[in-house]
Image (cartoon, grey):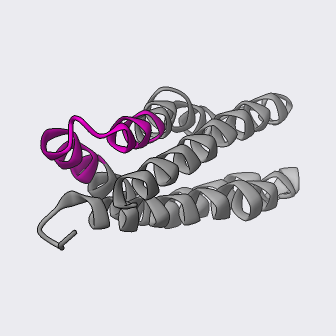
Amino acid sequence: MSLAEPAPWLLLVAAAHLGFQLTVDLVVYPALGDVPREAWTVAHDRHSRRITPVVALVYPPLVLVLGWTALVEPGDAGTWVALTGGLLAVATTAAVAAPTHGRLSSAAPEDRVALMRRLDRADRLRTLGAVVCVVGAVLLVG
């Protein structure tokens, strides 16, 4: 294995993605859920501004390296395990988490609890996808 191959890079970006997802799932969203009604709009706006650059650092490399791996290592089971997990996380982000955050930014207080539950469920899927992606990367490296 060399750095000219996608496997070590996939392990690196998949592990970074998993760390990001665990932080969001276990720290960020619970803290956001504890914000009092009167402080919600400011807290959510700050969260959105702060998390966007981190998402931009994590997701594009993940997608690019997954694509590279699929092109170079299509016959390895680890590739498809990683691709399945990575795509689950990316698709859940695009289809559920991002639109839910958009709705949360302007939601009435009585709608926030349901939207936060939806966001929590989506984040559990994203975290599961990140775990599966790391498993695939480990299989590929191993």
Would you say 88 lies left or right of 46 here? left
Q: Residue at x 76, y 59 (%)?
A: 26
Q: Is residue 55 magenta?
A: no
Would you say 93 lies left or right of 128 here? left
Q: Is residue 92 above or below residue 142?
A: above
Image coordinates of residue 113 in percent, x first then y, are 84, 35
Nearest to the observer: residue 120 or residue 9: 9
Q: Residue at x 48, y 26 (%)?
A: 95
Image coordinates of residue 9 in percent, x first then y, are 28, 65
Q: Is residue 45 above or below residue 77?
A: below
Residue 58 placement: quadrant: bottom left
Nearest to the observer: residue 132 or residue 87: 132
Image coordinates of residue 93 in percent, x first then y, are 49, 37
Q: Main secondary structure of the magenta part?
A: helix
Nearest to the observer: residue 77 or residue 103: 77
Magenta span of residues? 63-85
Q: Residue at x 84, y 54 (%)?
A: 38
Would you say 98 lies left or right of 68 here? right
Image coordinates of residue 124 in percent, x first then y, are 69, 41
